[in-house]
Amino acid sequence: MNTKQKNIRNDFYLLKHNKVVYFDNAASALKPKQVAKTINNYYTKLGTNSSRGVYKLAYEVTTLYEDSRESVAKFLNCESREVVFTKGATNSLNIVATSYGLNNLKAGDEIITSKLEHHSSILPWVEVAKKTGAVLKYVPLDKHSRITVENFKSVCTNKTKIVALTHMSNVMGYLTPVKEICKIAHSFNAITIIDGAQSVPHLKIDVKDLDCDFFAFSAHKICGPMGVGVLYGKFDLLNNMIPVEVGGGMIEDVVNGEPTYKKAPFKFEAGTPIIAGVIGLKTAIDYINNVGYDFIYKTSKELKDYLFARLKELKNITIYNDDTDIPLVAFNIDGIHSHDAASVYDNYNICVRAGHHCAKPLMDYLGQIATLRVSLYYYNTKEEIDKFIAVTKAVQEFFNKN
Ligand code: PMP
């Protein structure tokens, strides 16, 4: 562990005191004390609503709220009017499906998605297909279960209206070639919706370079607060969409009961916003930028190589994502149900994930009911991997499967 990583670990209570080996970062990253401080500061010293009052405190909160929007815009390389604050990636993806999908698709139109998707990326479109008569098509996965440009080309046609794909799989850790796919999709006039919930923690994102139409992520996966996320949308698209929720804070006027709505992004933020979360997101972005994506890439590569090398020393382990792009392994210990194994890991204070990972179509595709998933982030260490490997042996011994 180098000095930088040591300093980083000191910012996280659980890591500083070695309380657990936290290997469930794909579910949610841990939160540094800086994020907690921002939220605490809001609740103890501010606590007012934003965008409504004319008094100084309300103005201060509104400024912090809008500063966060600026910060997200810089983070994604877009304009701040293209940043909608939501409850999370799931909420963002549902907004696009409900507002854009239901109002623009008709029977026979095609929606391209994949079996690699998290339920939050695929199910909103399953519902749109049911309601509009549009047809869902899946990009065939290659032999590693990856989405490739070639396979995408094989399903994209003049009937394709929507392309809804994961940027990075939460089960396999595969990066989708989104830039190339968006280019092809646009040549057929299709709209692209990218689920960035897993890519944002690992990859510097430039939505202009990707040229996607919509992009969604959650704050909690980049060490930010729970309950807040982002929907990026190209301004003209967003601005022409009908709000999904209506209420306070998003109207321009109501004359004789007839409302007119504010422009994007405000028309998608009805009601009192998630103020502490939004402000905390800015601190999380500052934190990640301070850690630096270069450090994240370097650490991720080292951890990934070490994790796979050590896991492959063991017998009777089935790995499903041998050529993953991040330090994430989906595997099973032969003969042991993943939930049973996860309970034994827990006895040794190692947090790993077991189950279908909200990706049932992928589990069916892999022919598995469930897998174990170990997902690391920049604050994890080789020493923690060593402990994980030793406990994996203990799990095998416990169930007599070594
Ligand atoms: N997409 C992917 C790939 C995810 O991993 C997740 C969270 N596990 C989501 C979407 C949904 O994110 P949230 O639960 O924060 O809305």
Image (cartoon, grey):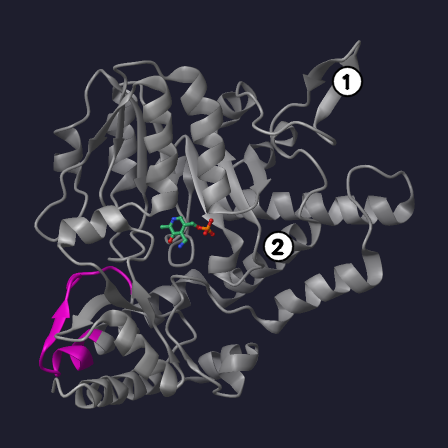
Location of residue 30 in the rendering, given as x and y in whole percent from the top left corner: 50, 69
Q: Quadrant of residue 176?
A: top left
Q: Which residue is mark 1?
A: 253
Residue in the picture at 46% in, 35% down: 94
Disc 1/disc 2 C-alpha distance (Å)? 31 Å
- The kind of residue tagged 2 is Lys
Q: Earlier in the sequence, mark 1 or mark 2?
A: 1
Which disc number belongs to residue 66?
Answer: none
Q: Would you say residue 7 is visible in this rendering?
A: no
Residue in the picture at 10% in, 46% down: 142
User: Could you tell me how many numbered marks the image carries?
Assistant: 2
- For the residue carrying disc 2, how many other residues have a C-alpha within 10 Å: few (<14), some (14-19), or many (20+)? many
Location of residue 157 in the rendering, given as x and y in whole percent from the top left corner: 19, 20
Q: Nearer the viewer, residue 71 or 46?
A: 46
Residue in the picture at 27% in, 29% down: 183
Location of residue 283 in the rendering, given as x and y in whole percent from the top left corner: 62, 60
Relative placement, left or right, of 14 versus 204 is right
- The kind of residue tagged 1 is Asp
- Quarter of the image with the N terminus is bottom left
Question: Mark 1, mark 2: which one is toward the viewer?
Answer: 1
Relative placement, left or right, of 141 versus 169 is left
**Residue 325 falls within the magenta-colored stretch:** yes
Q: Which residue is mark 2?
A: 282
Q: Would you say residue 306 is visible in this rendering?
A: yes
Relative placement, left or right, of 76 versus 400 is right
Query: Magenta segment, which residues?
Result: 308-326
Element class at badge 2 = helix
